[in-house]
Image: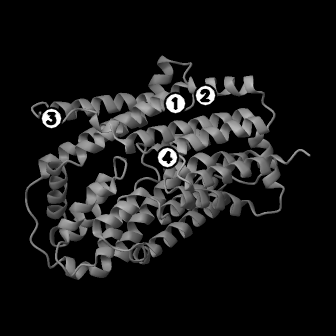
Amino acid sequence: MDLPAIVKVLSVFAGILLAIRLRVPLGIGLTVGGLLLGAWAGRSPAELVGDLGMALTRIDLWLLLVVIALIVELGRFLAEDRNATAIMAAARRFGGRHGRALSLMALPAFIGLVPMPGGALFSAPLVGQTVREPHWNPAWKAAINYWFRHVWEYWWPLYPVVILTLSIFDISTARFMAALVPLSLLAILSGYLFLVRPHIGQLAEGEAPTSDGWRRALFLAIPILTIVLATLLLPPLLVMVRPAWSGQTPRLAAMLLGMLVGLGLIFWDERHKLDHVPFAHLCKPQTLNILASLAGVLLFESLLQRSGLVPLAGQELASSGIPVGVIVAALPFVAGLVTGIAIGFAGPAFPLVVGLLAAPASTLTPMATLALAFGFGYAGMMLSPVHLCFVLTRDYFATPFRGIYRHILPCVLVLLFGSLALFLAFGHLGW
């Protein structure tokens, strides 16, 4: 008896999540899962080899891997002691009497502008230095570092999950930002209200802010702004030069050009330093694992599309009687909770969500679906006890998980309600 397409897809989805829990690398689990889906859909071994070959020759796959490798190098530069100290000094001065409260939020947030494996570990010492008096609760400090480290990832174009989501949903950067920037604003607001504001009086009693660091902090912003502006402005020009480029290729190529210019400024700044070998961080296991995971996500997406099961599964889910909003929210949330990384909820779950969106009888709209799926997937990831930043922050501040959960849970609930509100509002507007 031939099983429904949705049973096949969800079975492989569950198998991938189980493999990840058994510590099978995400990239391997996704690639094998994609091949199994193709075989279950009736693809012959020769066709599967051809599908895999086509996926491996996609230019956007290799552009993405190169861009992420360069982003890791940029993150290494921002996390250097002299740069992090300059950011802290600028935040303290800008905030005046409340400079310490501002720096608590700004330090992990600034480091979070550039994704890097275990990035929360780079900002944790700065948070600890900002509130170094012994009476501050370690779980609270860990929650501050963990939460504000992740306030930009909903829409910031340097993050792998954003690049990946843009590819899967086939949505413009401007529309993507319009849909998900509100989640960043909610994350910052909830973090301030629940984590910082209750201690605002005590934080104001700290030492006076320093006047150093402005020039260095301004310089640090230039490479990041260069990359973001290139990502937003260059794709139309690249399409004019190379009309054959489509999908994510122009955006990734524009980002690559911006990265090269930004890193050129950095290497010029470091030209007299002899203690750092450029790109040495790329050989670290964490970085290699991130690159392999990204490759696996793109291979899985390509193999899933070639299997032909996505539109069938979408139609079956839409006609199953289960509220479609529940499905759109639940799949990414579970995937995020199990995998603990953003591409871990986007890679397996978002192709299924897009299948629901494209179903003939579907009443979903693109931006509403994106806001709900991304918001719930991200909430699951932030609550995951296997999230690397969560684990490293907990270890650095030597505090139990339950203490951090107690502090961040109100913020996560605000995120969930916010994504649900955006889903309803965008759906009502037909966006």
- Determine whether, in the image, residue 150 is placed left or right of residue 267: right
Label 3 environment density (alpha carbons within 10 Å; few <14, some 14–19, many ≥20): few
Residue 294 lies, with reference to residue 406, above or below; the image says: above
Q: Residue at x 65, y 62 (%)?
A: 330
Q: Which mark is residue 269?
A: 3
Q: Quadrant of residue 148?
A: bottom left
Q: Nearer the viewer, mark 3 or mark 2?
A: 2
Q: Quadrant of residue 324?
A: bottom right
Q: Which numbered disc, 1 or 3, marks the residue that appears first in the sequence? A: 1
- Residue 233 drawn at (x, y percent): 41, 33
Q: Which residue is mark 2?
A: 55
Residue 1 lies, with reference to residue 276, above or below; the image says: below
Label 4 environment density (alpha carbons within 10 Å; few <14, some 14–19, many ≥20): many
Q: Are marks 3 and 4 in contact (CB under 8 Å)?
A: no
- Determine whether, in the image, residue 373 is placed left or right of residue 95: right
- Residue 31 drawn at (x, y percent): 61, 38
Out of 282 and 77, give the one closest to the viewer: 282
Q: Which numbered disc, 1 or 4, marks the residue that appears first in the sequence? A: 1
| Residue projecting furthest to the right | 1
Which type of secondary structure does the marked residue at label 3 adopt?
helix
Which type of secondary structure does the marked residue at label 1 adopt?
helix
Which type of secondary structure does the marked residue at label 2 adopt?
helix
Three-letter amino acid code at the position of disc 1: Leu
Q: Which numbered disc, 3 or 2, marks the residue that appears first in the sequence? A: 2
Q: Are marks 3 and 2 in contact (CB under 8 Å)?
A: no
Out of 245 and 385, give the one closest to the viewer: 385
Three-letter amino acid code at the position of disc 3: Asp
Q: Which residue is mark 1?
A: 61
Task: Tell how many labels.
Answer: 4
Q: Are marks 2 and 1 in contact (CB under 8 Å)?
A: yes
- Determine whether, in the image, residue 291 is placed left or right of residue 168: left
